[in-house]
Amino acid sequence: MNINLAVKTENITKTFLSHEVLKDCNIHVEKGTIYGFLGANGAGKTTVFNILTGVYNASSGEYTLDGENVIK
């Protein structure tokens, strides 16, 4: 299993009912690099990872893993 992926998000937003929990998130991680993902409680870190892994769908925006559009 190859877990060495490029990740790119463009304006990812997630809304639960009428509460916007993530707004216009933009991330670009090149293949072969390692980043830390830090933020305060409630900043949206887990929501971003849940979107990238398919647990949630983004309310809007696009994201790719290794150049493949995950939403489509």
Image (cartoon, helix red, strand yellow):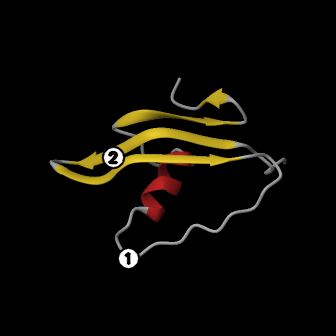
Q: Is residue 67 above or below residue 34?
A: above
The residue that mark 2 highlights is 14
Identify the residue at image location x=57%, y=67%: 37
Could you tell me how far apart the alpha carbons at marks 1 and 2 are, in whole angstroms? Answer: 17 Å
Identify the residue at image location x=64%, y=68%: 36
Q: Position of residue 40 (x, y in %)?
A: 40, 76
Q: Name the N-terminal-most of marks 1 and 2.
A: 2
Identify the residue at image location x=53%, y=41%: 9
Q: Secondary structure at mark 2?
A: strand
Q: Nearer the viewer, residue 56 or 42?
A: 42
Q: Residue furthest bottom?
A: 41
Identify the residue at image location x=52%, y=44%: 54
Lateral position of residue 45 relative to residue 52, left or right = left
Say which amino acid is labelled 2. Answer: Lys
Number of marks:
2
Q: Position of residue 19 (x, y in %)?
A: 19, 53
Q: Position of residue 2 (x, y in %)?
A: 84, 47
Badge 2 density bin: few <14, some 14–19, many ≥20, Cα 10 Å: many
The residue that mark 1 highlights is 41
Say which amino acid is labelled 1. Answer: Asn
Q: Residue furthest left?
A: 18
Q: Position of residue 16 (x, y in %)?
A: 24, 50
Residues under numbered marks 1 and 2 in contact, where contact means CB atoms less than 8 Å apart: no
Q: Is residue 2 above or below residue 70?
A: below
Lateral position of residue 63 relative to residue 66, left or right = left
